[in-house]
């Protein structure tokens, strides 16, 4: 003769033998205790998001900003130096037109931030000084804030 046990679980009455109830409780605890693997973002995925933000932010300050950042990123992956961007730089600065000095300063700041982020951690003080610049301060501030958020700005 097998003993029947009655349990009330969350208002539901359950009957069964001791082994059946043990099995049922095991199933319930297994489904409740399943662990979810943490989502990890690789450094490459982080850099892609940063590069997209970089390009979109620069585009709000200078037409062709996305293209400039895209070319910087291409050079980063190919291992080339900046000489390949001389023509693009001159096209964006467009020296004889009004505002050329502001565009030049903005691209110099962009290059400094890019080098700091992806090449060397030098130039931090130049970038920090650029945050108070009338021409490129807002851009530099937004980039530094993003770099701090993504832990790219070394204290």
Image (cartoon, rainbow, N blue to C red):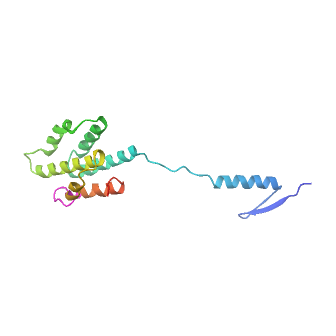
Quarter of the image where the C terminus is located: bottom left
Kindly identify the residue that appears in the image at 54 percent across and 49 percent down: 37
- Residue 115 highlighted magenta (yes or no): no
The percent coordinates of residue 120 (x first, y second) are 28, 47
The percent coordinates of residue 18 (x first, y second) are 82, 56
The residue at the far left in this view is 96
Q: Is residue 33 left or right of residue 67?
A: right
Q: Is residue 136 left or right of residue 144?
A: left
The residue at the far right in this view is 1
User: Majority secondary structure of the magenta segment?
Assistant: loop
Between 124 and 109, the residue placed more toward the observer is: 124
The percent coordinates of residue 36 (x first, y second) are 56, 51
Quarter of the image where the N terminus is located: bottom right
Kindly identify the residue that appears in the image at 76 percent across and 52 percent down: 23
Kindly identify the residue that appears in the image at 29 percent across and 34 percent down: 78
Residue 134, compared with residue 122, is above or below; it is below
Q: How many marks overall?
A: 0
Residue 1, compared with residue 81, is above or below; it is below
Kindly identify the residue that appears in the image at 20 percent across and 58 percent down: 129
- Residue 135 highlighted magenta (yes or no): yes
The percent coordinates of residue 59 (x first, y second) are 24, 49
Between 48 and 6, the residue placed more toward the observer is: 48
Q: Is residue 39 left or right of residue 87?
A: right
Find the magenta span and give its range: 130-139
């Amino acid at each position: 003769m097998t003993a029947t046990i009655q349990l009330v679980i969350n208002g539901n009455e359950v009957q069964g033998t001791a082994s059946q109830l043990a099995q049922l409780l095991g199933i319930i605890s297994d489904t409740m205790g399943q662990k979810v693997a943490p989502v990890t973002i690789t450094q490459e995925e982080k850099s892609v998001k940063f590069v997209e933000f970089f390009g979109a932010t620069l585009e709000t300050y200078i037409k062709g900003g996305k293209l400039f950042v895209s070319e910087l990123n291409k050079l980063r992956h190919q291992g080339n130096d900046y000489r390949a961007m001389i023509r693009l730089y001159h096209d964006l600065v467009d020296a004889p037109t009004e505002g050329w000095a502001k565009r030049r300063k903005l691209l110099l700041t962009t290059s400094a931030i890019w080098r700091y982020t992806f090449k060397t951690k030098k130039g931090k003080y130049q970038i920090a000084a650029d945050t108070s610049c009338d021409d490129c301060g807002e851009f530099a501030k937004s980039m530094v804030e993003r770099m701090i958020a993504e832990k790219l700005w070394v204290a």
